[in-house]
Structure formats: structure tokens, C-alpha cells
Amino acid sequence: MKDVTGSFPDGKITTLAGPSGAGKTTLLKLCNGLLSPAAGKIFVHDKPIHKVNPIDLRREVGIALQNAPMVKGSVYQNLSLPLELAGKQLSEQEAASFLEDVGLEDSFLHRDSKDLSGGQRQKVSIARTLVNSPRILLLDEITASLDQTSSREIEQLIVNINKRYHVTMIWITHNLEQARTIGHYTWVMMGGRVVETGESSLLESPKTEEVRRFVEGGLS
């Protein structure tokens, strides 16, 4: 990472685009404290990230990953995990409400997580992040391994969650059309640098030749 400076607008979806190895995942890990910057500072709602209790940080900054990891057991057990780690309990009624947020019926509560399809796993993973009522949600290629139908469903639920809860979202995607249509804002990263930022329409007419070549290659 080199001289990365910028901010993510509160309550909006910012997409991170760029080739593999550009530093997008590293940036995401810096945003939730999995990595610490060698220089410079990161602020979460105007507070230096190193001054935020790590447990509180994990609750405030949720993350959903491409492989949507599940613990062994039922969907309900997976949804209950965040509160169990805090010594609390999630009722089945509350769990069903979170499933409803991601478009799954309460009949999924007692389904074994290993029997879920890829799209269902991703929906449960996103529902699990909502249990802690995060103010920020980090999304790392969450539709990359899904078929087109499942991908569209995930895109729509993310848009719905953003509108309903006003959660600030930072979404890594290699799909430039997704970055353009889902994101309010976009950062284009290359070689550990932020090359261009702005409203996601920037992908339609990049200002730099470097980004223009990348976009033309990605959309061809």
C-alpha cells in the first residue's frame, strides 16, 4: 500500500475495483484491524482505529467473505455465534427476522449449514454479520463464486440492506458492471495505489489512461 488517502461516505456503498494484487483485500483488512498500517492512521467514525477495543471493532465493522465460512451445525447456530461470543443469546424469533432481511424463510433456521447452496450460504453469512448491528460492512468478492441468478439476488439484498439500515459498505468486486451499478462511489486501485476515485460513473469515462485501459479490458 502506498500513500492511500481518502474516506468512505457514511451510509453509502463504495466499490473497490482493480486487478488482482492491487491491494484491495489488504485495504479491507486494514479497515477492520486484521492488519495494522506501517505508517499513517485509520479512523473509524473519527476515532483512531488503534484506540477502538478490538472486540467492539469487530462488532462495529462486519465482514462477509467470498467463501462464506460456516461453523458446523444449523443455520440458527451460525446466526447465534456473534452473540454467543459476547455471552448473549439470540432468540429464534430474532434469528428468523435476520433471515427475512436476506430473503430466506424461517424454515431455514434448523437446516444444516452444510446442505446450503452457495447463494444460501452467502445470504446466511450476510445475515450473521447483521446480528451485531454493524455500522460498517466489508464485502470481499461475495458474488464471485455464484451463478448469475444468485449473484443478482445478493446484489439486490445488499442494496436493500444499505437502504434499510444505512450501513456504510465497502465492496471489493472484479465485476466492473457490478461496481458501476451497485456502488454509489468507486475506488480504482492498482499496484497498492488508489489511482482514481469518485462517483461510480467514473468507470464509464475514466480520467486517467491507466484506468481507461483497465476498464476497457474488464468490459471486453
Image (cartoon, rainbow, N blue to C red):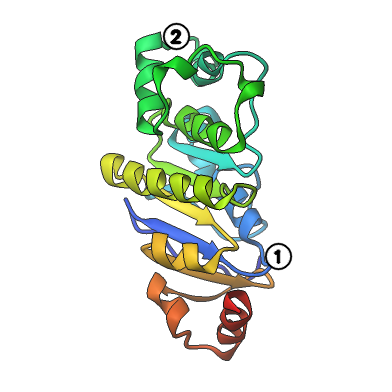
Q: Position of residue 44 (x, y in %)?
A: 43, 47
Mark 1 and mark 2: span between their CA atoms? Answer: 40 Å
The dot on residue 186 is none
- Left or right? Give the position of 99 relative to 165: right
In percent of width and height, residue 152 lies at 46, 51
Q: Secondary structure at mark 1?
A: loop
Residue at x-position 46% and y-position 43%: 137
Query: Vertical placement of 81 versus 102: above or below?
Result: above
| Residue 184 image position (x, y, % from top left) | 36, 63
- The 10 Å Cα crowd at callout 1, few under 14, some 14 to 19, many 20 or more, is few
Confirm whether residue 48 shows in the render: no
Which residue shows up at 65% across the image and 31% down it?
69
Residue 113: give x, y in percent of width and height. Answer: 61, 21
Q: Earlier in the sequence, mark 1 or mark 2?
A: 1
Identify the image quadrant of the C terminus: bottom right
Q: Disc 2 marks which residue?
A: 89
Q: Residues within 10 Å of mark 2 (few under 14, many from 20)?
A: few
Q: Nearer the viewer, residue 36 or 184?
A: 184
Q: Are marks 1 and 2 in contact (CB under 8 Å)?
A: no
| Residue furthest to the right | 21
Amino acid carrying label 2: it is Gln
- Furthest-left residue in view? 164
Residue position for label 1? 20
Amino acid type of the residue tagged 1 in the rendering = Ser
- The residue lying furthest to the front in this view is 149
Residue 11 as seen in the image, left or right of residue 102? left
Residue shown at the point (53%, 68%) measured from the top left: 176
**Mark toward the viewer: 1 or 2:** 1
Secondary structure, mark 2, is loop
- Which of the 4 quarters of the picture holds residue 153? top left
In this view of the protein, which residue sits in the foreground, 44 or 41?
Answer: 44
